Image: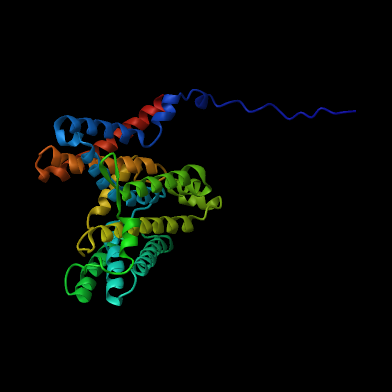
């Protein structure tokens, strides 16, 4: 005789989940506030700055946005993981300086200098992450120390090696042309010149979004940023995740440094200071919480685009550029307030 097995009553569906409307789910996305802000800023500059309406101007805005947006992608992932990197701005310059001076001083192929710079950049990222997880010192302080060290090294070593504050022109070194095609070339679409950094930026955004939303690593990043002790208790490799995120920031800083080197042939050692705040602002404007555990790569990209629009739109509008940083600060504060309001509205729906 067959027996009927009672598998029990299926669990009741959570009424709160059932009541979630598509609008509520949409507004719960971290980048929605940034998207609304980007639309408003675009409309403002479109109205007050006639040059802003040209496709060539849009291409320039996208280029500026990509140069800040590429590092901002990794900075956003790191912030979601609950950490900061204040050395990211000068790390961009450090990577460019290493590649330039190594290839020029040793008369070797540019690609070898590029690889040496990558190793140095990843080592810096590893050291930052290792110190944070092993000492328990806040990443704000660890990377602030790294910031000052790299800034000093950039200037001092460049002066010792080249006798100047900038590097020598490397455009005649073997391998420069091929490397330039990868990092700093441009192409034409509809008569408008587009920098290749835009394509790389889109690729990095896509990869970061896929990692966050479709992989175990993405779940770990959110979990570590939300609560590292709880994540460690359930088997998440917290230390490896955090070190990996610092190295991801170092990698995209290296990539940006390579673009600067091959776009201008030479590098000034004083560049980069202060850019780390722009990367963080882009991530925060894009919905990343300063406390970690929440945010998106797409949001950081929108934040970088907003910065690019402000950077160029003020010039196109003929406004006094002295007001730029005031506008940037107001933008950051406004974005935080808007993102907070959007999240509260989403929870109320």
Query: Can residue 142 be seen from the camera position used here?
Result: no
- The percent coordinates of residue 331 (x first, y second) are 22, 39
- The percent coordinates of residue 78 (x first, y second) are 39, 51
Residue 102 occupies quadrant: bottom left
Most distant residue in the front direction: 191
Residue 269 occupies quadrant: bottom left
Give me the residue at 36% from left, 30% from top. 344
Number of numbered callouts drawn: 0
Q: Is residue 70 left or right of residue 165?
A: right
- The percent coordinates of residue 183 (x first, y second) are 33, 56
Give me the residue at 30% from left, 71% from top. 103
Q: Where's the N terminus, which quadrant?
A: top right
Q: Where's the C terminus, which quadrant?
A: top left
Above-or-below relation of 45 to 135 = above
Query: Can residue 121 be seen from the camera position used here?
Result: yes
Residue 62 occupies quadrant: top left
Above-or-below relation of 65 to 2 = below
- The percent coordinates of residue 293 (x first, y second) are 42, 44
Name the colour scheme.
Answer: rainbow
Give me the residue at 52% from left, 46% from top. 215
Q: Nearer the viewer, residue 194 or 71?
A: 194
Above-or-below relation of 156 to 56 = below
Give me the residue at 51% from left, 43% from top. 214
């Amino acid at each position: 005789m067959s027996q009927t097995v009672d598998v029990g009553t299926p669990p009741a569906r959570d009424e709160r989940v059932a009541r979630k409307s598509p609008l509520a789910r949409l507004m719960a996305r971290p980048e929605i506030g940034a998207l609304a802000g980007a639309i408003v800023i675009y409309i403002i500059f479109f109205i007050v700055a006639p040059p802003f309406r040209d496709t060539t101007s849009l291409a320039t805005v996208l280029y500026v946005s990509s140069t800040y947006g590429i590092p901002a992608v990794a900075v956003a992932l790191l912030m979601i993981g609950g950490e900061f990197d204040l050395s990211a701005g000068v790390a961009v310059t450090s990577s460019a300086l290493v590649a330039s001076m190594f290839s020029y001083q040793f008369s070797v192929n540019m690609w070898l200098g590029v690889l040496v710079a990558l190793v140095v950049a990843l080592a810096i990222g590893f050291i930052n992450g290792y110190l944070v997880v092993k000492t328990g010192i806040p990443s704000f302080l660890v990377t602030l120390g790294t910031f000052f060290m790299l800034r000093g090294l950039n200037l001092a070593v460049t002066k010792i090696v080249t006798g100047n504050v900038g590097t020598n022109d490397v455009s005649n070194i073997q391998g420069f042309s091929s490397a330039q095609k990868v990092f700093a070339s441009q192409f034409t679409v509809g008569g408008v010149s587009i920098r290749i950094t835009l394509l790389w930026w889109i690729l990095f955004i896509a990869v970061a979004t896929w990692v966050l939303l479709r992989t175990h690593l993405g779940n770990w990043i959110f979990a570590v940023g939300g609560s590292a002790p709880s994540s460690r208790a359930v088997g998440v490799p917290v230390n490896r995740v955090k070190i990996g995120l610092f190295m991801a920031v170092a990698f995209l800083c290296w990539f940006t440094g390579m673009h600067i080197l091959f776009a201008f042939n030479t590098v000034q050692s004083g560049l980069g200071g202060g850019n780390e705040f722009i990367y963080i602002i882009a991530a925060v404007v894009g919905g990343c919480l300063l406390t970690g555990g929440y945010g998106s790569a797409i949001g950081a990209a929108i934040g970088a685009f907003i910065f690019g629009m402000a950077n160029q739109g003020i010039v196109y509008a003929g406004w006094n550029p002295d007001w730029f940083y005031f506008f940037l600060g107001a933008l950051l504060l406004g974005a935080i307030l808007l993102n907070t309001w959007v999240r509260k509205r989403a929870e109320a729906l």
